[in-house]
Structures are given as C-alpha cells and as structure tokens.
Amino acid sequence: MSRITGLRVRDVRFPTSREHDGSDAMNPAPDYSAAYVEITTDALDGLVGTAFVFTIGRGNEVQEAAIAALREHVVGADAEAVLADMGGTWRSLVHDSQLRWLGPEKGVMHMAIGAVVNALWDLRAKRAGQPLWALLADLSPDELVDLVDFRYLSDAITPSEARQLFEAAVPLRAERRRRLEREGYPAYTTTPGWLGYDDEKLARLCREAVDEGFAQIKLKVGGDVDEDVRRLGIARDVVGPDIRIAIDANQRWDVDEAVTWIELLRPFDIAWVEEPTSPDDVLGHAEIARRIAPVPVATGEHMANRVVAKQLIQADAMSVLQIDATRVAGVNENLAIVLLAAKYGVRVCPHAGGVGLCEAVQHLSMFDAVALTGDLDTRCIEFVDHLHEHFVTPVDVHDGRYWPPTAPGAGTEMHADTLDDYTFPDGPVWAAVETSVPDAVRVA
C-alpha cells in the first residue's frame, strides 16, 4: 500500500502576449498560463501525477490557491484506494458541501477539483503503463458508467442508457483502435487566426496550414466587422474553396449583433461560428443557431459543467460541442458530456487553444473514437502550434492529424526546467518584470 504524500501547485506563465499569440476580440494580450499541480506518493516507483488549469495570466494565482486548498482532501489518503475508485473520488470532492457552496459545481473551485482529478488519472495511467486514452478505452462498460455522476442528467441520459452505449462499442473496440493508430485523429488549426497578427503573417500561416495537411483553419473575429471581412477575404484567397474556415467570436456579441455580423461573413462559407455570445446564455445561443442556420454554432469551451452541456443539447443551441480538458471537473465530467453528445448525435470538436490543452484533450477524443462513438469522420480536435516543447510528451500532429500518444500518462507533465524558468513571479523569465500580484493570494 502507498499513500499520497504531497500536492504541490505552481503558478506557471508564458509571455505569449509579446507576440500576440492567443489574441482575440475579448482577450487582446493573453499570457498563456497554467496553475500546475503535482501529486506524489511514497511508492518506490517515484511516479508523479500531473495536471493543470489553463488561464491567460492574471488570476492564475487565484486558481493556484484553490488547488492548494484541496491538499487536505488527498494528502494522506490510500493511493491505491483513491485510484481504484475514481468515480467515488470525484464524488467525494465535488459533493463536499463546503467546497460545493463556492460554485456550486462551477468556477475556480470546480476547475481546481478538475486539476486534482486529472492529476490522479495521470498517476493511474502511469502506474498502468498506458496512455490515458487507452486506459479509459480498456475499462468495462460498468466501470465507465461508475465514473459518471448522473445527478441532474437523468432527464437526458440514464445510467442504463449510458451502459448500452458503451456495451454497443465493446465488439468494435479492437478495430476502431487499429483505425485510430493507422489514420490518426482529424485536426484543425487556429495557428493562423489570432487577431493581433498582421496581414503578411495571416497569409503565410494560412499557406503553411494547407501545406501541412489541415483541412480546416479557424480565425478570430469580433473586433471590427470591416476588418473581419477583409481578413477572411485574405484567408479564403490563400486557402482556396476546399479548405474549411471556422470563425470564433470569443463571446463578443449580443444576440442580434451576432446574427447581423455573421450574415456579413456568410459569403466566406463559414464552417462554424464559435462562442457568438455569452457561454452561459443557452437560450441566446439557441436563438442565434435558429436565425443563422445552416451555419453551425459551436460552443462549450467555457461551459461551467455537464448541466450546461445538457441544456445546450436539449435547446438545440449548438451543433458542435467543444469540450475543454480543464474547464470542468476533470476527466469524469468530460465523460458525462461526451456521453450526452453521443446519445443526441452531437459532434464533439474539443477546444485546445491554450498551453497543454492539445496534450490533454486528445486523450478524451481518442477514448471516444475507440470506446463510444467511433467517429473519425465528422469530428476534429483544435491544434495551435505553441508551447508544446515544454511538455515531456508533446503532441504528435502531422499531415493534419493527431497521432495517438503511446507514453504512459495523460500527457500533462511539464519539463522540470520549464517549471523553474517560467514560475511566476520568481522564475528567470519573469524575475526582471515588475509584477503586481497581491501577497494575500500568493501560495507557498
């Protein structure tokens, strides 16, 4: 038996705002950041479970403090018992009444729980010697159903229905896995699309995306409609008529404004419009979707939990659901969300526009491809070509596709040098920069 001996959390930030990487209509100068957690045990194998919550700079210290507040919930626990019952572990954290009061089941505390849950999954996969996607895809239907909290979901999907979906996939798992390993998982790229890039850079990155085999790119919009028309014109001229172009407003518009703006961009053959309004406005998304049809609405990267996902699906508020690996409470809750999507025939195209999100979310999509829907034809994972070098097992994306990772774990472990260099505010990358983080929210 081994025990969990430590939960360490660090404030890690990357100065991406200097080159406008990640810039959009709502976030003009993001510094991609991670509240990074490491869970250690006294086992002789020395394995460490790692995960993070993605932020864009200021406020990362608040997320760091929330994760640190969970130490007493895991340190000292029997590691084998915790890892063997990840459904029970998830419920013990999310259902804690005092933690729950801070949400309930949304916001900083919910994401902090997700980081701890994901770190435990990383540890479990490392101990099993499997990549997380394969570990999950090898679980029995009963084991998978036990991971999901069906509270608030039973009007949309029941445990019995979920079990049937998983059971139907069991005879197909082996062939689906071979296909995934043979063909990879479709990707699209947002690398050309950041709003702060000049025209030359936009055109060059669009050409490179086509040359690299991507069948879809995504551009940020919502700052100025005339600029959006002009930039989309540049992109369409470069990529030609056969490459899909999605657009992402990052919550910029009200409902009527969204409809008017999208109509002006419709001539560019839009693959989807992403986050056209507030992520909490389910009915607003539904109204936009109705009025701009057949242009698809995509949303979900900022949805607070599985309940919002259920409502978006029930209201026909979007036709592309975008899960995020660190926004909700970890792997377990994302399994609930992909189950909902599978039952109702909604395609899942994850958000991965942030440090480490590509590495993390690929495992969820690949699990779905093997053990749930088997869909490798209508779905895709976002890719951005930033900061992968900081991870021990960076994504392998080439020929416009993600290739299944083989290394044990969830892909979330950063290099030790990266953690030392980019820790905020004392790492050498930041030490010379004046900071204004209040002492009250610094975590030892």
Image (tube, grey):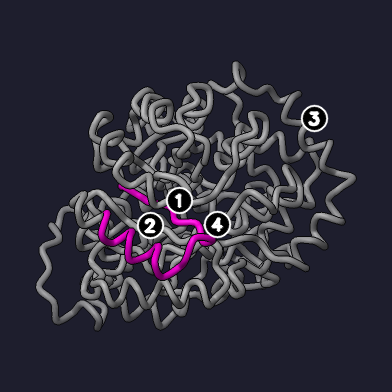
Asked if residue 84 lies left or right of residue 269, the reply is right
Q: Amino acid at mark 2?
A: Phe
Query: Image quarter for residue 290?
Result: top left
Task: State the mark number for residue 381.
Answer: 4
Q: Is residue 399 above or below residue 163?
A: below
Q: CB of mark 1 within 8 Å of CB of mark 2?
A: yes
User: Which residue in the structure is indicated by mark 3?
Assistant: 164
Q: Position of residue 437 (x, y in %)?
A: 15, 61
> Could you tell me which secondary element the residue under label 2 belongs to?
strand
The region drawn magenta spans: 229-249
The mark lying in front, picked from 3 and 2, is 3
Q: CA distance from mark 4 to mark 3?
A: 26 Å
Is 304 on the left-hand or right-hand side of 338?
Answer: left
Q: Which mark is residue 326?
A: 1
In x, y percent, where is residue 234?
A: 33, 66
Q: Amino acid at mark 3?
A: Gln
Asked if marks 4 and 3 touch (Cβ < 8 Å), the reply is: no
Q: Which residue does the numbered mark 2 point to in the structure image?
A: 54
The Cα–Cα distance between marks 3 and 1, rounded to whole angstroms, is 28 Å
